[in-house]
Image: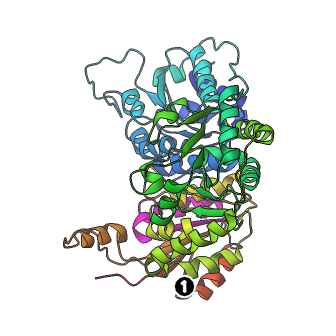
Amino acid sequence: MTGGEAVVRALAAHGVTRAFGIPGTHNLEIYRHLAPYGIAHVTPRHEQGAGYAADAYARVTERPGVAITTTGPALLNITAAVGQAYSDSVPLLVVSPGMPLRHPRQPTGLLHEMRSQTEALHAVAAFSHRVSTVEEIGSAVARAFTLFRTRRPRPVHIEVPLDLLETAQPAGPVRLAPPASAPGPAGPSLRDAARVLRSARRPAVVLGGGARSASAGCQALAEALAAPVVTTANGKGIVDETHPLSLGVSLHSPSVQKWLADCDVVLAVGTELAESDLWSAPPPLGGTLIRVDIDPAQMYAGLPADLALVGAARPTLEALREALEEATGDSGARDGAAAVRALRAARDAETAERDTRWVPYLRAARAVLDSDAIWTSDSAQCCYYGALPHLPVGPRGRYLHPTGFGTLGYALPAAIGAKTAHPHRQVVALSGDGGLQFSVQELATAAQLRLPLPVVVFDNGGYGEIRDEMTARGDTPTGVDLPSVDLPALARAYGGRGARADTPEALARALSLALTTPGPTVITVTEETPR
């Protein structure tokens, strides 16, 4: 079979049923075989949008997202999304053609020619694999899915030389990644961790995105320890944020950081405990740090573990809970719920003046949405200052935020990816006027697919965060004030709807209508722009 068919056969064999991408001159042999192998396709308006949509699809389905590009500029267009997926540990597979097998090192002026696609992608992906035969394609795809299933999931790029895509060669048998076999923690380390936790007087639990599959185990362990739970952005909602022990996304709060430093035991599950989680350098901890992570390297990054439990979160926490029941020790009475109430009040007092512009609108939006609604987020003030700490989410819902790498333009294409994965669940994109315009063309994609998709935009007249940082430095704001764009009118031009909401009640009404209207609805909330 041709290399193009071998690619699609391998994807289908690993359960892929949907791909995101844009056809181009060099990848047509791949597209030729998608429908016969039962793989549906979504065409965004930019390859970066394809990457963000596939990223969100992976996050909400817990299956790898697949994006297809053509050569050269198309592949480079998706690299920002690949970098975001790497930062957030998302299983994203990017498939592209490459220069012919025997293409000379000397430039020849071939269409989309560049020095090395694999070197470019190697810089942002877990690996970039250029195949040299049709038979190797199946092994390369199996290698990618093996990483997704058995190690810390991160993006992978597979390049197939464009002449190989069209060439018929023996393809060999279908190669399949082995089933997941989650590593478990060592026995003595597990018993030591259980003993330390059992004797703790001021325990804390910190959850990152790596704990997503262990929601029930995280809550059960926190309740057994009466320990407050705080999460990273990627861990948002793993434990219901209305639970009495939940501090939600609060690692950036000085009060919460001081409390963590004073805890005698901190159990960190599936998190880097990095600057992007804390918005500052990690604080020194005065107590014992127990880390649970599938990635052994995380035990020595940032804050090194005092006790390291290497393994996937769900089986490790199950084993830890059993060991905890057998462990001896007297912690005395703990009142984690009282500590949470005090810490919530302190956190909110720190930022009340800043956050008051978003909180009433977020409460109104939360009231009209189902508990399993999916929110997609952008690197915007309304998201990281507003929704992350102040919009409660539970395990049935999801909040997808581009942390770490911190890209702009994520929310809208990510909402498309999430909605195609779960067409019967409510999906809302939350963005700022600056970030939305990085990917605003994807309104056309949502309109074409007739996806009921509210896009809530807080308009502060430009790049508000950078404006504030310039002002704080004593600089004259430069390049951050953008002329107002009639975003509702732009949505209508793309085939959607548009509305303005000047009050929380107006936002609630507009959201309710948008959730039942085919196509995207841009709802603009105008903020007063500081000058």
Of 212 and 76, the residue lying toward us = 212
Is residue 439 rendered magenta in the image?
Answer: yes
Any part of residue 313 in sight: no
Q: How many marks?
A: 1
Of 420 and 27, the residue lying toward us = 420
Viewport quadrant of the N terminus? top right
The percent coordinates of residue 112 (x first, y second) are 36, 34
Is residue 249 rendered magenta in the image?
Answer: no
Rendered view: 455 above or below 229 = below
What is the image's colouring?
Answer: rainbow
Q: What residue is at 42 percent from the left and 37 percent from the top?
A: 124
The percent coordinates of residue 496 (x first, y second) are 58, 71
**Side of 479 relative to 375 (left or right):** left
Q: What residue is at 35 percent from the left and 72 percent from the top?
A: 462
Q: What residue is at 48 percent from the left and 71 percent from the top?
A: 382
Rendered view: 197 above or below 72 = below
Judged from the image, the secondary structure of the residue bearing numbered disc 1 is loop
The percent coordinates of residue 409 (x first, y second) are 45, 59
| Magenta stretch, residue numbers | 427-449
The percent coordinates of residue 258 (x first, y second) are 47, 60
Viewport quadrant of the C terminus? bottom left
- Residue beneath label 1, please? 501
Of 50 and 286, the residue lying toward us = 286
Any part of residue 116 in sight: yes
Predominant SS along the magenta part: helix
Amino acid carrying mark 1 in the image: Ala
**Side of 58 relative to 100 (left or right):** right
Of 282 and 427, the residue lying toward us = 282
Assess disc 1: are there few (<14), some (14-19) or many (≥20) residues with their C-alpha within 10 Å of its C-alpha: many
Q: Quadrant of residue 429?
A: bottom right
Rendered view: 356 above or below 61 = below
